[in-house]
Amino acid sequence: MKAGAGITEELKAKEQMKWAGLMNNVRSAAEEIVLNELVYC
């Protein structure tokens, strides 16, 4: 998911706020997938 969102170590070094926002989005999406698959099915 990180690769698909374009999250790289270079981005982390250059634009920390953008990197943090993208990481939060990926984490939220992954959490939603897990909850839907394991909890709500």
Image (cartoon, rainbow, N blue to C red):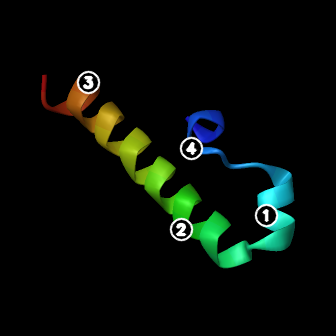
Which of disc 3 and disc 1 is earlier in sequence? 1
Secondary structure beneath dot 4 equals: helix
Report helix, strand or loop for mark 1.
helix
Name which of mark 4 and mark 2 comes first in the sequence: 4
**Residue 41, how many percent across, how many down?**
13, 22
Marks 2/3 in contact by CB < 8 Å: the verdict is: no
Q: Which residue is mark 2?
A: 21
Marks 4/1: CA distance? Answer: 13 Å
Residue at numbered disc 1: 12
The outermost residue toward the bottom is 17
Q: If you read the primary sequence from the N terminus, does the residue marked by circle 2 or circle 1 appear first?
A: 1
Q: CA distance from mark 2 to mark 1?
A: 11 Å
How many other residues sit within 10 Å of disc 2, few (<14), some (14-19) or many (≥20)? few
Q: At 49% across and 48% down in the image, what residue appears?
A: 26
Q: N-terminal of the two: label 3 or label 4? A: 4
Q: Which mark is residue 5?
A: 4
Total marks in image: 4
In this rendering, position of residue 11 left or right of residue 25? right
Say which mark, if any, is on residue 3: none
- Check the image and name the residue furthest to the left: 41
Q: Nearer the viewer, mark 3 or mark 4?
A: 4
Q: Residue at x 65, y 35 (%)?
A: 3
At a point 53% along the width and 68% down the height, the residue shown is 21
Q: What residue is disc 3 on?
A: 37
Residue at 64% x, 77% y: name it. Answer: 17
Q: What is the distance, in whole Å, between disc 2 and disc 3 at their CAs? A: 25 Å
Residue type, mark 4 in image: Ala
Quarter holding residue 37: top left
